[in-house]
Amino acid sequence: MPEDATKYLSHLELGEPDQTFLDSNELIINMGPQHPATHGVLRVILKLDGEKVLGTECVIGYLHRGVEKIAEHRTYAMFNPYVDRMDYVAAVSNGLGYCEAVEKLQNIEAPPRANYVRMILTELNRVASHQLWLGTHALDIGAMTPLFYTFRDREEILKIFEKYCGARLTTHAFRIGGCLYETYEGFEQEVLKFVKFVRPKIDEYEDLLTTNRIWVERTRGVGVISTKDCIALGVTGPVLRASGVKWDLRKAQPYAAYAEMDFEVPTGQNGDTYDRYLVRLAEMRQSLRIIEQAVEKLPDGPILAKVPKVLKPPVGEIYHSIEAPKGELGYFIVSDGSTQPYRVRVRPPSFVNLQALDIMVRGQLVADVIAVIGTLDIVLGEVDR
Amino acid sequence: MPDFLTAYLQSNVTPGEAGSAFWALIYVLIVFAGISVAVMAMNWLERKALAHFQIRLGPMRVGPHGLLQPIADAIKLLTKEDIVPSAADKFVFWLAPLIILCASFTTYIVVPFGRAHAITDLNIGILFMLGVSSLSVLGVVMAGWASNSHYPLLGALRSSAQMVSYEIAMGLAVVSAVLMTSLNPSGTGTLSMIGIVQAQEAQQTWFVFKFFPLGFIALGVFAIAMVAETNRAPFDLPEAESELTAGFHTEYSGLRWSLFMLGEYAAMIAVSSIAVTLWLGGWLRPFPHWLAGQSWDLVFSLFPGLLFLGLAAIAFVGVGRMPKHPYFKIQTAGLAGFGAVLGLIGVVLFIPPVRDRVQDIFWFIAKVAVFMYLYIWYRATFPRYRFDQLMKVGWKVLLPVALGVLLLTAVAGILF
């Protein structure tokens, strides 16, 4: 057995090394960091009995870039683009969380129009993130085709982003105090057109998977996590909601202009992979509802509040969290009164949710590990930061 | 012309039966080359069809519509460095792909492409085929073991368990078809592949329609089991890409890897031809009794030529639609040449002696092609089964169904 594997697995009660190879039923394999199904550079050490998983240990840090440390050497505005690189699948959400946290610290109020534009873009990004999740998750389980369908539709969202701010993935769409760019001509129509376009596409994904016998067998009862465990581990987002907790920060502590929106928080009962799949699909539909309402109510007015040239927030600290596509994304910022934050701590949903992997797969089969990693919807850029 | 050339051509039996070693050898070469070409064509078709299922274009760069892609792939694989892991058992590592390749190619000895178009006609043909094709599991296990690595080992274990369990359901389904052959007017059954087709001819029905729905269910069981047997989606656990990277051939590269692929696709064609022979009337043309008579014979014998002319027409339409830019000149010329060759083959297929001799092969290949298309279709549609579910399907569903069909076929055979 490799030495480092023993170190990581010490809590799994490995016991004395076996006398001969034949006495051993246990197999320790490394899944990752180079593996097609770990969504990046996640390394999972698996302890197996044949196909059965006896325990897992996640080894992370292969994508660590020290984002939090970088923040201490950048001004508040300069750090803004860095947060896009954490959860690069949902860069807009990351930006929203950071900007709102700094605004709270500095006591700036973003104008209503900015809030609405922020909401539209964030919800579009939620749909894009869920589409990417669905495609890759289905691919992990062996269904190749949905991947291409979801990417085709996600492309339309990226086109809107590109037209709005010039970037497709790491958008840096928002600034502290609002948005830098006014919406382009025909923005509203284009967004509504997209909503109309994507609704039947979501039904199409459902046609491919929801009643597919093999899909249901592969996901139902797989990776079950109870409400109690979810709360104990701090798991949030669709994973928590699929376990039956109606907890959504957009409802619980509304930010931007979510208080004025009419939408539902979909929940599941069983907390298994299938429920998480249904919850995310329902969330995509709810996001479309929000987008429609927001476009309809989009107020006129300035899009950027009056912000001092040099941001020097008063001494203090702030914790602000938003509902990112993957769960609660929180920013804890400590200000020492200078132009640079004293400390920025990010509470990334992927990192916290990844903890649940072990209890979700213990006693299940190797193939379920893949399904569960997929259903947790982790992005390694955010896990490692 | 020398006798050893003409004796077989004037007969209506296989070269083996006609005692013509020369023609048997020619057939061995034709079959070997033909299957290799079919595998390449299948490779292109799979990538193309799969791409279109998935709103992609697939290969487009190498030759018109990527027609030369398989050749480019072959050159790439042949020239790649041949890596043998240092911890591997070298001899077994070297032997495993050869065993898989030999197992899948040897089965073609008894595949009847037509009454006179098989290398030979063994009286235990179907038994031989099942026996030899199941040898490939040996190659899989050897490959997994010799790689001396965790993922291949897991893949090989999965594969051996899967192939062994599905062979049982497969065998029972085959037995029910063999039982049907004993309902011949002559009253004797046969295991010979040619005999089985002739039995369907004599009983004036394909076995898939015999004792409806018994034959149909048996074909269904076989069709599912054969997908599992060849490790294809949705039963592709041994090489489940997302779980085991590439399963038993993770450590293989270059030529050896391509031998695995060649073996896999050859095995797919082989099991499909078993299904066609046993249930879908082998080389028999559709409706040989309902639409009987000289004129109908003529109409159906024109099909092969018409098909090739049709393909040629498609190629020429493609030529017309090629971009007019000088950059595409060579590609356009290539596509036109391809169309011309297809057209020429089509014309040759209209010549009466060729037409009559080749017709059987055409219908056989057409039926096999349906199964090959199904393989691609499954791959585009289904997620992958989990290992325990796979075993459950094999032992708890397919096996009882196959047993029931076998029993009912026997009862029906006595009653009717």
Image: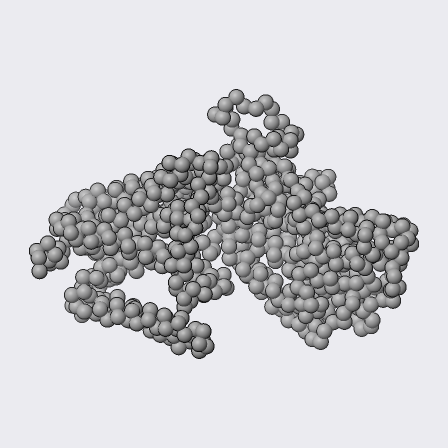
Using residue B180 as the reference point, say whether residue A30 is left or right of it. Answer: right
Q: Residue at x 8, y 57 (%)?
A: B2
Percent position of residue B267, x then y: 34, 48
Which residue is found at the position 74% from the left and 64% from the top? A173
Task: Between residue A320 and residue B327, name the one nearer to us.
Answer: B327
Along the line of sight, which residue is nearer the eye, A124 or A26? Answer: A26
Looking at this view, is B400 or B130 the one in front?
A: B130
User: What coloring was used for the rendering?
Assistant: one colour
Q: Going by the image, does B369 lie left or right of A39?
A: left
| Residue A101 drawn above or below residue B337 | above
* Residue occupying the point 33% across, 50% down: B266
Q: Where residue A314 sits in the image (x, y, percent)?
A: 91, 54
Residue B188 in sight here: yes
Q: Is residue A112 visible?
A: no
Q: Residue at x 57, y 63 (%)?
A: A152
Q: Position of residue B333 (x, y in %)?
A: 36, 73
Image position of B118 (left or right of B309): left
- Image location (x, y in percent) of residue B25: 19, 51
Q: Is residue B142 above or below residue A116?
A: above
Count of picture labels: 0
- Above or below, B397 relative to A318: above
Quadrant of image for the N terminus of chain A: top right
Q: Quadrant of residue B143?
A: top left
